[in-house]
Image: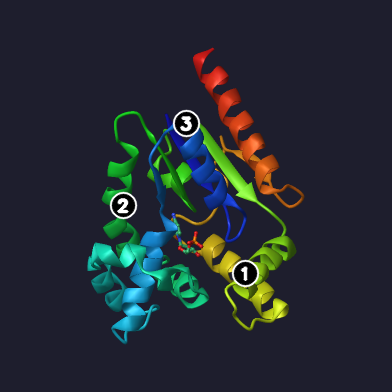
């Protein structure tokens, strides 16, 4: 079974995708990490994420970069959001993601365009969201927990800027697929959000078997 999980930053989509993968015994790919790796590779080489040539050259990154702790930083997230708007970058990362989808038995992928572009054939699609204030609070708590000195208002404006960039780009924008089920996690804890996600997948299975 292929499960597509899309949504904006800090919506809980990664946590939900991991939990679904565990529940169904499927491999999981966090596609945001690919864009983050490109973003970090550009920054480390002294390039400019908004320059398409610099970003495209960085798509050739060493796979060891995918486990670099620097990928989780805000700088990497911002650079990822910028490089991901370049068509040549998206094209360079496409086959790797499609190959992951085509594994026997299926897979769980999370990102921005899984249900719309990478795996439009997925029988189970979730669009995970939450209010920007709740998402900013989650990211703020996470960064504080890492010992970083952050200001909530800055985190909120960063989240809003990222939403605008990811939803407003011309290619594969962040958008709920017509056949995706909306899961708003604003008032749900991890256990409740996971339970609801499993329920949605189970209903999809019943629907596709009918
Ligand atoms: O999910 P994330 O925060 O790790 O993603 C970082 C950025 O990568 C996000 O702001 C936009 C981009 N991205 C994308 O364009 N398409 C995806 N499938 C996943 C991420």
- Quadrant housing residue 139: bottom right
Asked which secondary structure carries label 1, the reply is helix
Asked which secondary structure carries label 3, the reply is helix
Is residue 18 placed above or below 43 in the rendered structure? above
Q: Is residue 192 left or right of residue 9?
A: right
What residue occupies the far bottom of the structure in this picture? Answer: 46
Could you tell me how far apart the alpha carbons at marks 2 and 3 are, in whole angstroms? 25 Å
On the image, the x and y values in percent for residue 38 come to 34, 69
Q: Cβ of disc 1 within 8 Å of ligand 1? A: no
Is residue 28 placed above or below 201 in the rendered structure? below
Tell me if residue 39 can be seen.
Answer: yes
Q: Which mark is residue 129?
A: none
| Residue at 27 percent of width and 72 percent of height | 58
Query: Which residue is labeled 1 in the image?
Result: 159
On the image, the x and y values in percent for residue 141 come to 67, 69
Query: Which residue is labeled 3 in the image?
Result: 24
What crowding class fits label 2: few (fewer than 14 Cα within 10 Å), some (14-19), or many (20 or more)? Answer: few
Query: How many labels, in total?
Result: 3
Quadrant of the drawing holding the C terminus: top right
- Quadrant housing residue 183: top right
Q: Foreground: 40 or 118?
A: 40
Could you tell me how far apart the alpha carbons at marks 2 and 1 are, in whole angstroms? 25 Å
Asked which secondary structure carries label 2, the reply is helix
């Amino acid at each position: 079974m292929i499960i597509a999980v899309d949504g904006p930053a800090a919506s809980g989509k990664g946590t939900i995708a991991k939990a679904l993968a565990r529940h169904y015994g499927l491999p999981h790919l966090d596609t945001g990490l690919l864009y983050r790796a490109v973003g970090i590779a550009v920054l480390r080489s002294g390039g400019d994420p908004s320059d398409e040539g610099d970003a495209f050259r960085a798509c050739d990154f060493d796979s060891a970069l995918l486990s670099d702790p620097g990928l989780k930083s805000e700088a990497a997230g911002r650079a990822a959001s910028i490089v991901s708007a370049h068509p040549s970058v998206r094209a360079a990362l496409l086959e790797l993601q499609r190959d992951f989808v085509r594994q026997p038995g299926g897979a769980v992928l999370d990102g921005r365009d899984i249900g719309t572009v990478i795996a439009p054939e997925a029988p189970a699609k979730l669009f995970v969201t939450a209010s920007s204030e709740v998402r900013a609070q989650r990211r703020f708590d996470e960064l504080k927990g890492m010992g970083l000195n952050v200001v909530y208002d800055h985190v909120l404006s960063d989240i809003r800027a990222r939403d605008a960039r990811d939803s407003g780009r011309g290619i594969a924008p962040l958008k709920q697929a017509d056949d995706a089920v909306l899961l708003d996690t604003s008032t749900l804890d991890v256990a409740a959000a996971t339970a609801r996600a499993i329920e949605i997948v189970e209903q999809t299975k019943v629907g596709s078997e009918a």
